[in-house]
Image (spheres, rainbow, N blue to C red):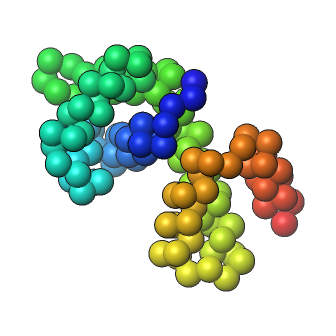
Amino acid sequence: MAVGESSENYLETILILSKAHPVVRSVDVAEELGFKKSSVSVAMKNLRELGHITVTKEGFINLTASGREIAEMIYERHQLLSAWLVRLGVDEKTAAEDACKIEHVISKESFEAIKGHVNRT
């Protein structure tokens, strides 16, 4: 299931956009991330080849089971780490930026320990 940070960011963005919009297209992902559509198209091709997304003939992007699993893992990490940092006194913008960095490199074991601690407090 291991994919790179860039792929994780794309999958997380697709998940977030799919919660807010009935369909997700490459142009939506490009706008959300501030990337060129051509760059996003290459990334979508790679994610499709890895089996993490499907793209309909109309250009609608859907997460596969493996893509959704990765996206939800990263999204959960981002949400929990960001909220935890804010509770520790970090301003929201910095907390979100730092959570975005940490979510990709933290081990499952460390994240679960932090999650357990946060949920106990």
Give percent across and percent down for residue 119: 80, 57
Q: Is residue 119 visible?
A: no
Give percent across and percent down for residue 60: 22, 28
Q: Quadrant of residue 86?
A: bottom right
Q: Is residue 71 above or below residue 118?
A: above
Q: Residue drawn at (67%, 82%), measured in percent from left and top?
A: 89
Q: Is residue 31 above or below residue 58?
A: below
Q: Residue drawn at (48%, 43%), measured in percent from left and top?
A: 5
Give percent across and percent down for residue 18: 35, 40
Q: Residue drawn at (30%, 33%), measured in percent from left and top?
A: 43
| Residue 13 in the figure: left or right of residue 113 | left
Q: Work out which quarter of the rendered image holds the N terminus and state it.
A: top right
What is the tally of numbered marks visible in this picture? 0
Q: Is residue 60 above or below residue 94?
A: above
Q: Is residue 68 above or below residue 54?
A: below
| Residue 6 in the figure: left or right of residue 108 | left
Q: Quadrant of residue 107?
A: top right
Q: Work out which quarter of the rendered image holds the C terminus and state it.
A: bottom right
Q: Residue drawn at (34%, 17%), measured in percent from left and top?
A: 49
Give percent across and percent down for residue 63: 39, 27
Q: Is residue 73 visible?
A: yes
